[in-house]
Image (cartoon, grey):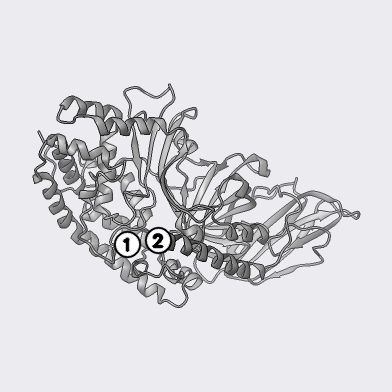
Amino acid sequence: MGDLRRLGRFVRAFWRATIIFLLTFSGGGLFTALETAPAYAQNTSETIVFSRNSTVTRQPFQLTMTSRAGGTIFYTTNGALPNPAATPYSGPLTIAENTVIRAQVFDQDGNPVGNPYNRTYIIADYDQTIPVMSIVTDWAYLDELHTHADQRGREWERPITVEYIAPGGESQFNVNAGIRIHGHFSRLFSPKKSFRLYFRKSYGGPGRLDYPLFEDTDVHKFDKLVLRAGFNDTFVAQSIPGLSNDHYLQAKYISDQVARNLHGNMGQPIAHGSWVLLYLNGQFWGLYNLTERIDDEFMQSYSDKDSQWDIISKDSGWDKDGHWYNKEVVNDGNYGGWLDNQNWVGSADFTNPGNIGELEWRVDVENVFSYMFLQAYIQHARGWPGNNWIVYQRVDPGADIEGNERKWRMMVWDAENSFGGGVHGKMDVNVVEKVYSPHDSITRILEKPFIGFCGFKHRFVDRAREYLGVENKFGKPESEIGQLSKERVRAEILKQAAIVRPFIGMETARWTPDLPGVEMWEKNIADMLTFVEVREEVILHHLDILRYQTFTECK
């Protein structure tokens, strides 16, 4: 453990020095005021008219800015807010490379007139088939966040303007928000950070972003979003001092998104996601997975707006003093309900069938079966179940006493080390035996019931075979079986791979230029498809081991 602490301190110091060097060259002063950004469509209340809105284009162009309020337009191109010491606009600007313009009108006495505005212009050498997300802010803020990436909470949130440019090059929204560093290991070990975006009225923007970001959901209002860098499923980690490991060379970039979508296909709630190209002040920052954030507001979006939830996750990392921790964390609500449930599971006698009924009253068994078997099927063997899980339960009086919301359920999150990742490409690891392990609180939910009541264990095996589509002994509708059949899993992998394929070259050139990234990625996707071809037979064998395993107390 001492070695881990020393490694954490070394890497933190290394990246502070590195990021300062990387970001300082862009320059820029501190914010002097907070921007109120307009919606992308110009209107008569705006003090500055841009001849061209934010866009992604292949062709250079001339940009003009016109003041509707008299005075002089001052502008910057480095992310800093303009002031009278910035560049005065005197004529058309040639936009021939990626450029962010922040502009504001000032009167002759140097007083600001109206609001500052920003526009993002990306001169692309690619066909834009996925959205561009542009974050504009002072580089000093980004530097501060990167060099103190181990810090958390509202005090480490900084103001930004975020813009979303849809495929085809048209801006869809341009709003103020806050940004924080997100994640665990990647906070200290990766130059490509994950981010969390907060939409607050205090920034002068909307209290909630209102835009349909994700398919397969009617939810279109968000108070926060996560930009996932996908640390463990990228090549980035391979180049980190002290962390070099062959398993990072198996990166597929899409594993977590595929896993979440598969759980959605199984009829379970998920954090929806999509792919974006992220730019910070006009600099390409990489391929990112934009997702919903699993918290109280997320749950309310899919339930009653006044509902209240207990949400617990397993968290690990280094604290600000360099000490390693691994613990259950309350994301929202309270810990008492989860602790009570786990204490009951630990003390109940499951040779008594009545306690199986009590378990089903406390826990959404269909959700737990689907979650556990999915983890086993995708071979989430590195980091789970000792980490990377989320459980949740509705706790307000409005919860339906007979419904599933008031029961404990599980949601897929951070399944990067899966489909052969994290275990050097192995495809035969038995994760079924982990779903009833005594070593973590979520798997203890199945441990004693499996040992004490064989019928419950057999029920899990039967349901797993239905998920695979190899059995339907109870005559269920086709929509309720085969969600993890070879054909459907393969289709989801091919879908996500097709979305990101055009941009893997950009991503790897940005972060791992010394690796033959595209060729390696294509091989890894081929390996992922091979995993699907062989995994069914492998896991059916693992299920047979579970079915015929004799437990001393099993009735």
* Disc 2 element: helix
Residue 91 visible in the picture: yes
Q: Which mark is residue 422?
A: 1
Circle 1 crowding by C-alpha within 10 Å: few under 14, some 14–19, many from 20 = many
* Disc 1 element: loop
Q: Position of residue 319 (x, y in %)?
A: 50, 52
Circle 2 crowding by C-alpha within 10 Å: few under 14, some 14–19, many from 20 = many
Give above or below for 30 relative to 450: below
Q: 117 or 157, which lies in front?
A: 157
Give above or below for 448 relative to 549: above
Q: Residue furthest right?
A: 109
Q: Which residue is mark 2?
A: 232
Q: Position of residue 451 (x, y in %)?
A: 16, 38
Q: Position of residue 488 (x, y in %)?
A: 26, 53
Q: 276 or 332, which lies in front?
A: 332
Kindly identify the residue that appears in the image at 22 percent across and 40 percent down.
447
Amino acid at the residue labelled 1: Gly
Residue 37 placement, left or right of 506: right
Q: Which mark is residue 37?
A: none
Residues under labels 1 and 2: Cα distance? 8 Å
Residue 34 placement, left or right of 498: right
Amino acid at the residue labelled 2: Asn
Q: Position of residue 389 (x, y in %)?
A: 36, 46
Residue 98 visible in the picture: no
**Image quarter of residue 362:** top left
Look at the image and tell me in which quarter the C terminus lies: top left
Q: 419 or 282, which lies in front?
A: 419
